[in-house]
């Protein structure tokens, strides 16, 4: 088991955003977490990356309890995050943003930079452009590329398809699959449940701070409740 979350509660003041969630991700998997607005998806990712502390429960990564470990140490441990809203440095070039992702590393970056540019040829073309002047989809690529530069064992992705045109969405999802094929485990949060489930091994459904369902992704794609709530009705007809 790469990541194991046990009975985690997270509060914002008196609001209980996560009401005792448990989930597991195995090495090599793509797991997605689907749920409506405000269900607690972003809170779950922030809890895993250490931006949000837990009220109770535990987070175990590669067998080590990281529940109280600081966020930057989790990056070193192998948890990379591409945050919601992208979070690029707008005044920096694409290349500088990618290097920022590697600031905790002391080893040779050239090979990993080449790999990011190979995954995202668009970024290679624009490596000297200020990131703030790039399109939403391109900034999303920079954010994912920057997270990859931390050399994560596990990549956390918060709504990578948000605000993108359908063609770009398909492209981003196929790049996520390629990243996974090359050995990185992926935990994906998406409102675009259809596409997320199509590339995932398994998924969890989160409703108002609780996990209400977990199953292989193919099973959830055919689950009438999931279809009704997250897939816009029965798409097979
Ligand atoms: P979305 O898809 O809309 O981003 P989400 O599933 O990611 O939603 P979260 O952002 O995790 O949901 O929010 C879960 C709950 O916690 C919501 O009710 C939200 O209003 C609340 N919440 C999130 N951040 C804060 C905060 N900083 N202060 C108070 N409440 C918060």
Image (cartoon, rainbow, N blue to C red):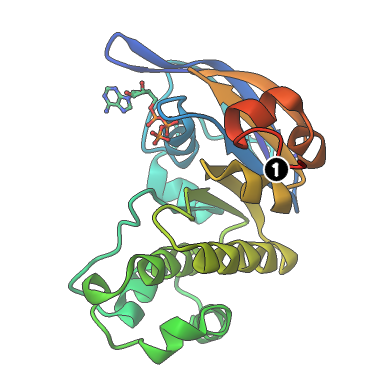
Q: Secondary structure at mark 1?
A: loop
Residue in the picture at 27% in, 80% down = 93
- Foreground pick, 154 / 82: 82
Specify the quadrant of the image occupied by residue 204.
Answer: top right
Q: Position of residue 30 (x, y in %)?
A: 70, 49
170 left or right, relative to 51:
right
Above or below, 91 against 117 in this view is above
Residue in the picture at 59% in, 64% down = 170
Above or below, 35 against 171 in this view is above
- Foreground pick, 120 / 103: 120
Specify the quadrant of the image occupied by residue 227.
Answer: top right
Q: Position of residue 153 (x, y in %)?
A: 62, 56
Q: Position of residue 181 (x, y in %)?
A: 74, 66
Specify the quadrant of the image occupied by residue 171.
Answer: bottom right
196 left or right, relative to 54:
right
Q: Position of residue 101 (x, y in %)?
A: 40, 66
Residue 84 visible: yes
Q: Name the residue tied to disc 1.
A: 2
- Foreground pick, 230 / 176: 230
């Amino acid at each position: 088991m790469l990541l194991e979350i046990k009975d985690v509660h997270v509060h914002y003041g008196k609001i209980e955003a996560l009401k005792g969630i448990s989930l597991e991700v195995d090495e090599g998997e793509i797991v997605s977490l689907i749920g409506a607005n405000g269900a607690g998806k972003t809170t779950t990712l922030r809890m895993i990356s250490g931006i949000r502390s837990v009220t109770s429960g535990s987070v175990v990564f590669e067998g080590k309890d990281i529940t109280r470990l600081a966020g930057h140490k989790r990056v070193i441990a192998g948890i990379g995050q591409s945050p919601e809203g992208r979070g690029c440095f707008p005044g920096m070039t694409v290349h500088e943003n990618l290097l920022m992702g590697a600031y905790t590393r002391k080893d040779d970056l050239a090979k990993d930079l080449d790999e990011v540019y190979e995954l995202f040829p668009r970024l290679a073309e624009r490596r000297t452009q200020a990131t703030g002047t790039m399109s939403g989809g391109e900034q999303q690529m920079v954010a994912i590329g920057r997270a990859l530069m931390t050399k994560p064992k596990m990549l956390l992705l918060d709504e990578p398809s948000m605000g993108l045109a359908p063609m770009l969405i398909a492209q981003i999802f196929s790049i996520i699959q390629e990243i996974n094929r090359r050995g990185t485990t992926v935990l994906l949060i998406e409102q675009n449940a259809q596409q997320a489930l199509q590339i995932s091994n398994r998924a969890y459904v989160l409703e108002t701070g609780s996990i209400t369902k977990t199953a292989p992704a193919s099973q959830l794609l055919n689950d009438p409740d999931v279809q009704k709530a997250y897939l816009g009705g029965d798409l097979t007809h």
